[in-house]
Image: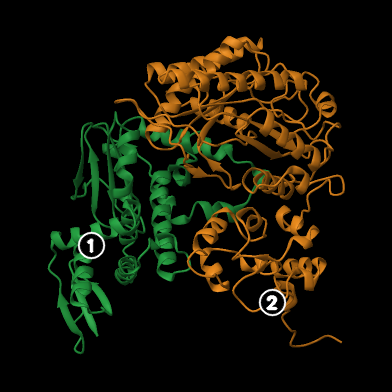
Chain colours: A green, B orange
């Protein structure tokens, strides 16, 4: 059994793929150092991340198919699924070995797999755009936490920077413990979590909330409750579109907001 | 913003909720410099209510006072309900604050008619104008055009809004006259025409001058109420088809009539809104817009109403068995689109994928075809299986309907707790 061990970066993975092709060894598993457990009977290959090797594979994929396909591979990598390394390996191997652009050959298994995973990642990113809820703090920073299934926050930053260009905001990934802060000029990656934030519920502590914040949450909740048409109640569809794992971020689903105002 | 605003907001939302349009797509208004917001071309939903509808836009009535008395409307003047009026400033502030917190994608503003159409329209336009010019807001705005307002106001509305709409509500003029005596087809179609012409004019103008301001970039839409009058599906869909063709509408929405004014004897007594029928109409609408069907193929004089049990595409296939089976590896795109269980995306993938190798059932399944339905209507690189022609349409229908229902033994009532001491 051939085990390739890489450093859990995208560059590292492509280096591993480069080495596998270069050495003409078919890996049985490509695994990140974080999840690696020693295996007596495996031949181990420690991969040293090399940006030249990365570029070589990257450009080869780009030449054989196109830029869009490269992005597609990167997106599937963000899914962080346990088998994703081998799926990407198989796909890249297929691209390199096939004389034509294999990207739209939907009779190939790995093409369909990559497309399906890419779709899932894209959908999760879309959900971040949908369900992120900012809370205004005393220092006029709009704060939001989220714990997406896949590592998709990086894909959404451009959207929020364009949309909220005139307000400072923070989006924090509570699962992966990093986030982005926009200071009206640039977006910076931040890693330390604010002590004033409850990571479980994503709520900012009351003493640092802006005075108007609670009111607008209540207004929104009031609006949300009224806009529902009771005669058309359809819980099944509701749950399908708005899964429970997002509820903790949504002020409209916070039942404490209901009874305070008459 | 005062805490009392919540009551206003609730009354206003209650009045506006029966308008179904909530699309925020179709416009492309980038954030100019350091303003607030952008309207993205694909639209984003931000929440979902318990009735399964999405909330993309903040749907408000500027006022729910109205001088009209339309039988289907909750805001008709003879209804004794709480009434309220927003000031322009309040609506602007609510929109901005909700938008900044990522609650909404934009504003949907409608209004009851007060004093006269021009006065009402002017106030609505000033909300849009304030948002765009004073607040530097580039998010989505949908304005309801008030029938009978002047061309000049329509022009202004189109410049600030992303989409304009006039609701036609009832599918035939005689029925409209009966339940909404203040309205006529002319009063609705005229503003629609004006908007359409202005959009075309604007497109011409933008061809010459690249920076000419856009007029209603996300087009116009309308809404039809279903089930409030005895109009057939054929009539409704024909009207919708005409509107798509002659008025260049982006969307026609169908709204199952929610019985809000039960005391009015001109309206049918319904226990619940006709949701299934509404769903079937949307499916038919999709067939017309994306599947290259003509209205006549979906509903015609022999079948004036859509089948509520099965979807319109399946029902078309069952009525026309001689078109099937379709050979997946040879047929053209339009023909493949007509197979029940194959959607636009799967059809495109089939066309692309079959260039490289012949497709079989397992390929099709992975592509995303719903084989449960499709298998009776196709042949592919697989041994011959019984298709609709061997099984006959009525049997296929029976099989498909029985698959949808839970099996008898899984029904709760099937098993009963046995009694230990049976009483004889």
Above or below B374: residue B308: above
Q: In this view, does B3 lie to the left or right of B410?
A: left
Q: In this view, does A253 lie to the left or right of B118?
A: left
The answer to whether the residue labelled 2 contacts the one labelled 1, judged by CB atoms less than 8 Å apart, is no
Pick the residue in front: B54 or B338. Answer: B338
Residue B376 in the image: x percent, y percent? Answer: 70, 69
Please tell me which residue is depicted at 35% across the width and 52% down the height of the picture: A68
Q: Is residue B398 left or right of residue A217?
A: right
Q: Residue A5 carries which label?
A: none
Given the image, what chain letter belongs to the residue carrying mark 1? A
Above or below B324: residue B83: above
Count residues near mark 1 (Cα–Cα under 10 Å), then give few for <14, some for 14-19, many for 20+. some
Q: What whole-number distance in Å separates the C-alpha atoms at marks 2 and 1?
A: 45 Å
Check disc 1 and report the residue beneath it.
A57
Q: What element carries label 1?
A: helix
Check disc 2 and report the residue beneath it.
B385
Residue B404 in the image: x percent, y percent? Answer: 70, 66
Quarter placement of the C terminus of chain B: bottom right
Report whether residue B243 is seen.
yes
Residue B89 in the image: x percent, y percent? Answer: 45, 17
**Furthest-bottom residue in this view:** A41
Above or below B286: residue A61: below
Given the image, what chain letter belongs to the residue carrying mark 2? B
Q: What element carries label 2?
A: loop
Pick the residue in front: B310 or A72. Answer: A72
Quarter placement of the N terminus of chain B: top left
Pick the residue in front: A238 or A91. Answer: A91
**Furthest-front residue in this view:** A99
Residue A257 in the image: x percent, y percent? Answer: 45, 41
Task: Give residue B3's quadrant in the image.
Answer: top left
């Amino acid at each position: 059994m051939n085990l390739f061990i890489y450093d859990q970066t995208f560059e590292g993975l492509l280096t591993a793929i480069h080495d596998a092709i270069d050495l003409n060894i078919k890996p049985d598993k490509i695994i990140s150092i974080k999840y690696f457990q020693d295996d007596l009977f495996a031949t181990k290959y420690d991969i040293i991340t090399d940006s030249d090797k990365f570029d070589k594979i990257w450009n080869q994929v780009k030449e054989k198919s196109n830029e869009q396909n490269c992005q597609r591979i990167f997106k599937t990598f963000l899914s962080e699924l346990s088998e994703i390394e081998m799926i990407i390996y198989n796909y890249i191997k297929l691209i390199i070995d096939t004389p034509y652009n294999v990207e739209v050959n939907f009779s190939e298994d790995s093409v369909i797999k990559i497309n399906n995973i890419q779709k899932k990642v894209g959908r999760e990113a879309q959900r971040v755009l949908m369900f992120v809820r900012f809370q205004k703090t005393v220092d006029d920073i709009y704060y939001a936490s989220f714990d997406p299934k896949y590592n998709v926050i990086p894909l959404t930053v451009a959207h929020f920077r364009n949309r909220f260009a005139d307000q400072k905001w923070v989006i924090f990934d509570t699962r992966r413990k990093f986030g982005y802060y926009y200071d009206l000029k640039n977006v910076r990656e931040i890693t330390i979590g604010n002590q004033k934030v409850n990571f479980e519920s994503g709520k900012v502590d009351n003493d640092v909330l802006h005075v108007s914040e609670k009111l607008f949450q209540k207004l929104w909740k009031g609006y949300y409750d009224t806009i529902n048409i009771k005669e058309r109640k359809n819980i099944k569809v509701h749950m399908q579109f708005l899964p429970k794992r997002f509820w903790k971020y949504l002020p409209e689903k916070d039942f404490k907001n209901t009874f305070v105002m008459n | 913003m005062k805490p009392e605003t919540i009551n206003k907001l609730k009354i206003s939302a209650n009045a506006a909720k029966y308008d179904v349009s909530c699309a925020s797509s179709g416009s492309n208004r980038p954030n100019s410099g350091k303003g607030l917001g952008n309207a993205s071309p694909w639209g984003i939903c931000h929440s979902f209510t318990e009735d399964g509808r999405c909330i993309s836009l903040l749907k408000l009535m500027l006022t729910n006072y109205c001088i009209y008395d339309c039988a289907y409307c909750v805001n008709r003047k003879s209804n004794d309900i709480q009434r309220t009026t927003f000031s322009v400033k309040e609506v602007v502030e609510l929109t901005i604050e909700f938008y900044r917190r990522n609650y909404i994608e934009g504003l949907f503003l409608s209004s009851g008619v007060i004093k006269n159409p021009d006065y009402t329209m002017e106030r609505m336009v000033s909300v849009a104008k304030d948002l765009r010019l004073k607040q530097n807001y580039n998010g989505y705005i949908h304005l309801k055009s008030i029938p009978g307002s002047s061309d000049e106001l329509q022009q202004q509305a189109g410049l600030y809004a992303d989409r304009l709409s006039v609701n036609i509500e009832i599918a035939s003029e005689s029925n409209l006259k009966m339940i909404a005596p203040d309205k006529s087809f002319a009063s609705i179609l005229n503003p629609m025409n004006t908007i359409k012409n202005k959009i075309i004019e604007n497109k011409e103008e933008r061809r010459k001058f690249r920076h000419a301001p856009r007029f209603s970039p996300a087009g116009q839409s309308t809404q039809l109420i279903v089930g409030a009058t005895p109009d057939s599906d054929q009539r409704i869909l024909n009207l919708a088809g005409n509107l798509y063709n002659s008025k260049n509408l982006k969307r026609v929405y169908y709204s199952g009539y929610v019985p809000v004014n039960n005391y009015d004897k001109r309206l049918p007594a319904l226990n619940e809104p006709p949701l299934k029928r509404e769903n079937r109409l949307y499916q038919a609408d999709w067939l017309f817009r994306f599947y290259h069907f003509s209205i006549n193929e979906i509903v015609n004089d022999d079948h004036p109403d859509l089948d509520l049990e099965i979807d319109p595409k399946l029902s078309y296939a069952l009525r026309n068995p001689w078109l099937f089976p379709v050979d997946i590896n040879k047929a053209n795109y339009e023909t493949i689109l007509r197979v029940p269980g194959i959607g636009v995306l799967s059809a495109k993938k089939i066309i692309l994928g079959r260039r490289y190798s012949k497709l079989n059932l397992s390929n099709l399944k992975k592509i995303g075809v719903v084989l449960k339905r499709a298998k009776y209507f196709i042949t592919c690189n697989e041994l011959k299986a019984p298709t609709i022609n061997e099984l006959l349409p009525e049997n296929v229908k029976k099989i498909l309907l029985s698959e949808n229902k839970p099996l008898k033994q899984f029904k709760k009532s099937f098993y009963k707790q046995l009694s230990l001491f049976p009483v004889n």
